[in-house]
Image: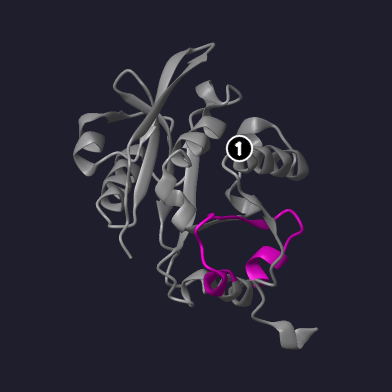
Amino acid sequence: MEHRKTYNAKEIKTPKGNLLIEGPVSPGKLMEYEFHKDLVAFRPPEQQKKALIEIAALPEGRIIIARHRDIIVGYVTYVYPDPLERWSEGKMDNLIELGAIEVIPEFRGSGTGKNLLRVSMMDDAMEDYITITTEYYWHWDLKGTGLNVWEYRKVMEKMMNAGGLEWYATDDPEISSHPANCLMAKIGKRVDLESVQQFDRLRFMNRFMY
């Protein structure tokens, strides 16, 4: 499959200053920018920057960033699912995962997350993919936001909806292990029926249990 990437950008106004939401960005561009010290959700900022540069270099990898001048304050990543997850078992070249989304506390609540998703979906090539995201409550910043599990889940769903992702049922054990966890997906307009059926089989691999 040919992974076409078309750059898009959008400026948004926030109480803390204007942000440029742009991408997919190249590894070279990512190297030029500073990674904000508060981007610590997954690993220390410098290590996470290195990981994003590696993803940006992958044929299917996409990084959309939010930056304040030359400082990256938020990002979203798209990449093939982890080989250890069931979503990779179908070896589908048109199924990609929204792997991580992070915005520093200073810019939360200003629509930055929603706009990262909107800009990522401005690329027409996204209509060739089934885009999924797996949401697990143990990854959420409940302490930093002061939200409970259900409030945070509502915020996450609204944000994902901005990118056209919707809730999908699944019997995946990790997702089923807590009612707040969920699978969300967007099926692109040009995705063929066979791929949709294959995705359905991945969603329900334990049918014999019922």
Image spot of residue 171 (x, y percent): 70, 72
Number of numbered discs visible in the structure rendering:
1
Give 147 or 168, whichever is nearer the viewer.
168
Residue 31 at what x, y percent from top left? 21, 36
Which residue is found at the position 70% from the left and 44% from the top?
153
| Image: 139 above or below 92 | above
Quadrant of the rendering where the N terminus is positioned: bottom left
Q: Does 175 lie within the magenta span?
A: yes
For the point 69% across and 32% down, the residue is 146
* Amino acid type assigned to the residue bearing label 1 in the image: Ala
- Residue annotated with mark 1: 162
Range of residues picked out in magenta: 173-196
* Residue 96 in sight in this render: yes
Q: Secondary structure at mark 1?
A: helix
Residue that appears at 67% across and 76% down: 204
Please name whichever residue, 135 or 47, is drawn nearer the observer in this view of the structure. Answer: 135
Q: Is residue 107 above or below residue 166?
A: above
- Image location of residue 85, percent across then percent down: 50, 70
In this rendering, position of residue 91 left or right of residue 109: left
Closer-to-camera residue (99/3): 3
Please determine whether, in this image, residue 146 is positioned above or below residue 110. below
